[in-house]
Amino acid sequence: THGQLVKDQDGHKYVAVGVKLSDDDEKVPQLWFQPKAVDGKASCCFPSLPLGLLSSLLSATGTEQLQEVRPEEFDAAEDSEGELVTLCHECVLPVGASRYPCQDGTGVCHGECMAKILLDASKAEDTARENEETKKKIKDRQEYNIGWRPDKMISRNIEVARRRRIPHPQGAKQ
């Protein structure tokens, strides 16, 4: 059953995840498992073993709650004809003959997706550099007392009027 935990004679544990028809012409139902010893997301079946022999080799040890896996977490999928196709790690669409290895080394992606990844990385580097330059400029202006400051450089009209003894207009703030 779905979520049943089983182990083989060597002690390897598997979780039953579902049934799928075989890819050959016979379309035999195959029981698929998720191996517990694998770190990443994976599934497998035992295609050459008949169900009777498989049940004698595996013993039930309990059940386990399965986590739903999103399509973008897979490297490959089946197309409408049941053929295995490689998926792009960026857009999760099938990759054709032109493919590029991902920078993290975990898969492949389209040329357009690789260009987007490189452009985004370049923009992030530029933004970080501009932020650092702005911080340095502000620090230098404060440290060396340089730059234009309106509060210290624009004279107040009231002070100019007093020095020149110009009468203050009525209603104006002093």
Image: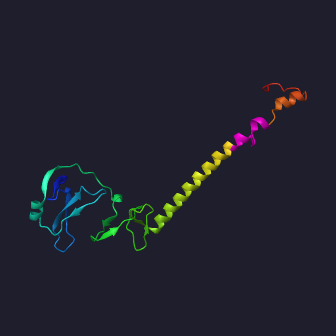
Q: Name the image colouring.
A: rainbow
- Residue 163, magenta (yes or no): no
Q: Quadrant of residue 100?
A: bottom left
Image position, residue 90 (x, y; %) = 42, 61
- Residue 144, magenta (yes or no): yes
Report the front residue among 39 and 112.
39
> Is 108 situated left or right of 65 in this image?
right
Image position, residue 69 (x, y; %) = 30, 55
Residue shown at 23% from the left, 63% from the top:
44
Q: Is residue 60 above or below residue 150?
A: below
Q: Is residue 152 above or below residue 38?
A: above
Residue shown at 57% from the left, 51% from the top:
128
Secondary structure, magenta segment, majority class: helix
> Is 29 situated left or right of 70 in this image?
left
Q: Is residue 147 above or below residue 75?
A: above
Farthest front residue? 10
> Is 130 situated left or right of 84 in this image?
right
Q: Quadrant of residue 40?
A: bottom left
Q: Quadrant of the N terminus?
A: bottom left
Q: Quadrant of residue 33?
A: bottom left
Image position, residue 14 (x, y; %) = 20, 56
Residue shown at 81% from the left, 35% from the top:
155
Report the front residue among 57 and 111.
57
> Is 52 situated left or right of 144 in this image?
left
Q: Quadrant of the C terminus?
A: top right
Q: Which residues are magenta?
A: 140-153
The number of discs equals: 0
Image position, residue 38 (x, y; %) = 27, 58
Report the front residue among 174 and 67.
67
